[in-house]
Image (spheres, rainbow, N blue to C red):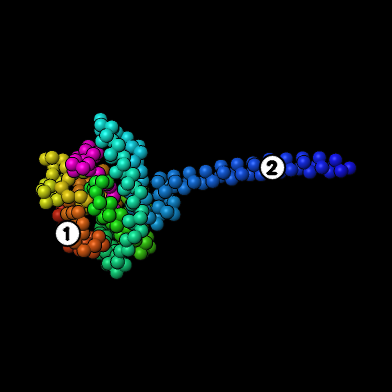
Amino acid sequence: MIWKWFLGCLILGISSCGICTQKKKDQKDLNMTENKGIQVDIVDNVSNELWKLHPTLHYMRGELNSMSKMTGEYAHRTGSAVKDSAMVADAQLFWNDFETEYMMYTPSETLLKQLDSVLRSKVLNAGSGLITLPTFRLLMVGGNWCSDTRMGLPRLCKVLDQLMLISEGNVVISKNELEVSSIRLVLDYLRVDRDKNFIESQKARQYLLHGGLSNVKDGGMGGINLNLEKAGRVPEVLFSQKLLSNKSAEVLVDQAEDSWIFMGSIIEMPMKSWEADMLKFFAESVDATLLIDPQIKK
């Protein structure tokens, strides 16, 4: 009788170990899946709650992550293993530090509310009962190796993300496009090497040679030297606005067809703060629609 009881306990123990082992394996697989899912969501899924709360943070960290791994559009090689290694290390360093600098910065809520009000005032009533959203591009030019870039751009991203949170109706359209304060904002980042040459030169040429930006030539005083295709002081944040035409008065602006006009830039560091300088910048900017047809707003 005793040996039957002992044999039953032994079988039950072995079975339990198997169940526990399977449960541990299942839990491990679940954790790996969840962790993998979270990572993918942060980088690629703009419907994720983290994206909605911190869209520009995750956009920039996603770009820097691709740079550090040389994947996607950053998969090219420069022809020098030493130079490639340095660029990867710079991107990794910026990626590691980005969130820390971002979290440490606290923009002024008062200035953010004023900026929100100024941007909303730029919404155009097209006269046909439909609204045309003004579209702006915010082009960040920086060096992953540059301490001013690694301090300034995370702060700028914090300003934009906080702006997304202070009022209702803001939407993350894609990883680099936001609808915020009733405007459409397109983000992009161009990096330069330690000699201030654009690493993604073809992409830089596409942006910097369109109308308006050719006015920014003095690399010595900051800005972009188009003849040498290199930057001056970094970071530089360039603002441009999409020009509207009569045909666009009844539809959202088509980015593929309409032109852009350069508005100006913040070079190296803001005069006061990122939110203060952006508020002043947009408050003083000329409505680009008036440059085409003053009657469009009537």
Label 2 neighbour load within 10 Å: few <14, some 14-19, many 20+: few
Q: How many marks?
A: 2
Q: Position of residue 127 (x, y in %)?
A: 25, 59
Residue 230 position (above or below residue 295)? above
Q: Position of residue 114 (x, y in %)?
A: 27, 67
What's the residue at 35%, 55% (across, down)?
Answer: 100
Which of the labelled discs sits on residue 286, or is there none?
1
The quarter of the picture where residue 229 lies is top left
Residue 199 magenta-drawn? yes
The quarter of the picture where residue 4 lies is top right
Image quarter hosting the C terminus: bottom left
Position of 31 with respect to 288 (left or right) is right
Residue 245 magenta-drawn? no
Q: CA distance from mark 2 to mark 1?
A: 73 Å
Q: Which residue is mark 2?
A: 17
Q: Position of residue 141 (x, y in %)?
A: 23, 48
| Nearer to the camera, 275 or 16 | 16
Q: Earlier in the sequence, mark 2 or mark 1?
A: 2
Position of 228 with respect to 28 (left or right) is left
Magenta stretch bounds: 183-205
Q: Residue furthest right?
A: 1
Instruction: Mark yes or no: residue 296 visible.
Output: no
